[in-house]
Amino acid sequence: MPLPLVLVTGFGPFEDRRHNPSRAVAAALERDPPAGLRVRARELPVSFLAAPREVERFVARHAKSRPILVLGLGVQRKGYFRLERRARGRYTTQRVDNDGTVGASLGARVGPMLRTTLDLRALARLLRAAGAADVRISNNAGGYVCERTYHALLASAAKRALSALFLHVPPAKDIPSRTQARLVRAWLAAFAAQASAMRGRSSGVSGREAAKARKRSTNSRTARPM
Ligand code: PCA
């Protein structure tokens, strides 16, 4: 049996951010994966229109392997880790992406708000336990390309009954990329060990099936509820 797979995306430079640790972290995870996991990483363009297309292609290519997580990474301005709960389908920002597209030109066409089905409080605890001092849960993914990308990650994952999540990482001046990679690697290893307990209400799974799965994982010794 091949090891469980995690798909990870990151971004390169944009606006005044010349160094984007999300790209370095995604690449480091593929090169040196967390214990017990395989990782496929992909750098996405900082583009409102191209990133969602690449997300769908990336998830489609690996869907047969049933990844246990589709994880988007992007950098934020603040010095902490931010687990994003949801992605809006409506864009109003005047910020421009690397292709020159203004966010607001997308308007409300993208679709309804989408939410992760993962247990963010449990995931925040795991990330702290992995050594991250400041981890927060957020209901606002920023309204820029990361939020549009998260919407695509959630849509592509939900179509295939997979779990998706977006993590905003701090700038490298606050926490160096190598340290970030080490923290995220340890976090994913812990997630993998408890993945069945974390996947609460996976979309595409009926409430009854999900409840049974939860009960099974609660009863098993390897996956304690957190
Ligand atoms: N952060 C931006 C887009 C790319 C990135 O790394 C954002 O938060 O939307």
Image (spheres, rainbow, N blue to C red):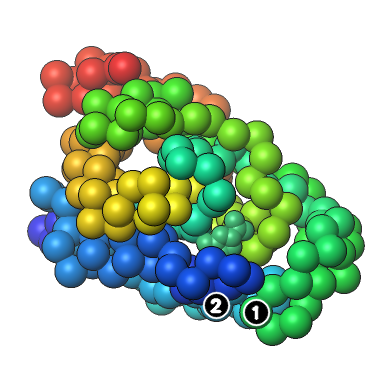
Report whether residue 68 is seen. Answer: no
Task: Choose between 189 and 212: the one closer to the eye.
Answer: 189
Amino acid at pointer 1: Asn
Label 1 C-beta lies within 8 Å of the nearest ligand 1 atom: no
The answer to whether residue 97 is visible is: yes
Q: Is residue 69 above or below residue 49?
A: above
> In the orientation shown, which residue stands out farthest toward the front?
173
Task: List x then y, in percent, for residue 43.
Answer: 43, 74
Q: Ligand 1: which quarter?
A: bottom right
Q: Disc 2, disc 1: CB below 8 Å?
A: yes
| Structural distance between the alpha carbons of marks 2 and 1 | 8 Å
Q: Secondary structure at mark 2?
A: loop
The location of residue 18, given as percent across then percent down, is 49, 72
Query: Percent x, y for residue 40?
Result: 29, 68
Residue 10 left/right relative to 29: right
Instruction: Name the quadrant of the C terminus.
Output: top left
Q: Of the two numbered discs 2 and 1 on the same chain, state the one appearing first in sequence.
A: 2
